[in-house]
Image (cartoon, grey):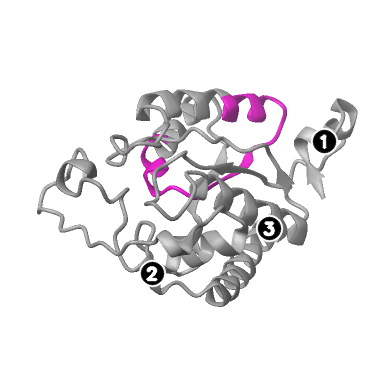
Amino acid sequence: MKEWCQLTSDEIAALDRKLPVIMPLGLLESHGPHLATSVDIDTAVFFARRIAENTGAILLPPMPYGFADEMAEYVGTLGVRADTLATVITDLSCHLCKHGFKRQIFLSGHGANRLPVELAFYRIWEEYPDLQAAYWNYWTEAGLSNLSHADKGETEIAVAVGTRAHLDRAKDSTVSKPWYRIRSRAAISPGTGGVNGSPSQANPQEGQRVCDEVVRALSAKVMRIIESD
């Protein structure tokens, strides 16, 4: 597998620039009393690594500090502002472009990372208009539409990818959101750690099946990119 941080500069220089680079994006974030804060990092790294192994794409080191959005006030969440992440992605992407790696996939385990990453694309295009970049939430791109924060589905996936879990501590909770965009989920759902669903019903075997499905779907998408002109 082509893992950027394990290669020498000469080995990187010899890589095919047609290959996309994949950067896993996460966030240290509260996921209730039953999951470690590493969920969004663990999922992004797991899927990015498996995709790189399957396709020959180039795996970049992960970005663990994502955009701490409405989850920021829960204890355990540790991230950055949207404009901070946009600036970091802009700098890293431009550096990759400078060395000829202009096919870039930012694979995220945290949905709110989309806003700053796509903002960064518009900044990068001012200098590198030939950048070909995509932001993917792993679940959306794999066609999973029924996941909520730290619910049954995300808990199953987290356990399958190796996140530290305490299923006996799982507490079900439903977040009732108003019609307007909220600033803080903790303000309307305190004490839950952001859980929105029924993690007490999680089935680890189902998580493995879903993970295999995600890997197949995303590997196929990356192969189509590699094979395109």
Q: Which mark is residue 6?
A: 1
Pick the residue in front: 35 or 119: 35
Determine the secondary structure under disc 1.
helix
Q: Tell me which segment is drawn in magenta.
A: 92-116
Residue 73: x %, y % from top left: 28, 35
Residue at 47% across, 63% down: 167
Residue 97: x %, y % from top left: 64, 30
The magenta stretch spans residue 114: yes
- What amino acid is at disc 1? Gln
How far is mark 1 from mark 3, CA to CA? 17 Å
Residue pointed to by mark 3: 51
Residue pointed to by mark 2: 200
Pick the residue in front: 181 or 9: 181
Residue 145 seen by the camera = no
Residue 213: x %, y % from top left: 58, 73
- What amino acid is at disc 3? Ile
Determine the secondary structure under disc 2.
helix
Residue at 64% across, 54% down: 46
The magenta stretch spans residue 24: no
Question: In the drawing, does residue 167 fall left or right of residue 82?
Answer: right
- What amino acid is at disc 2? Ser
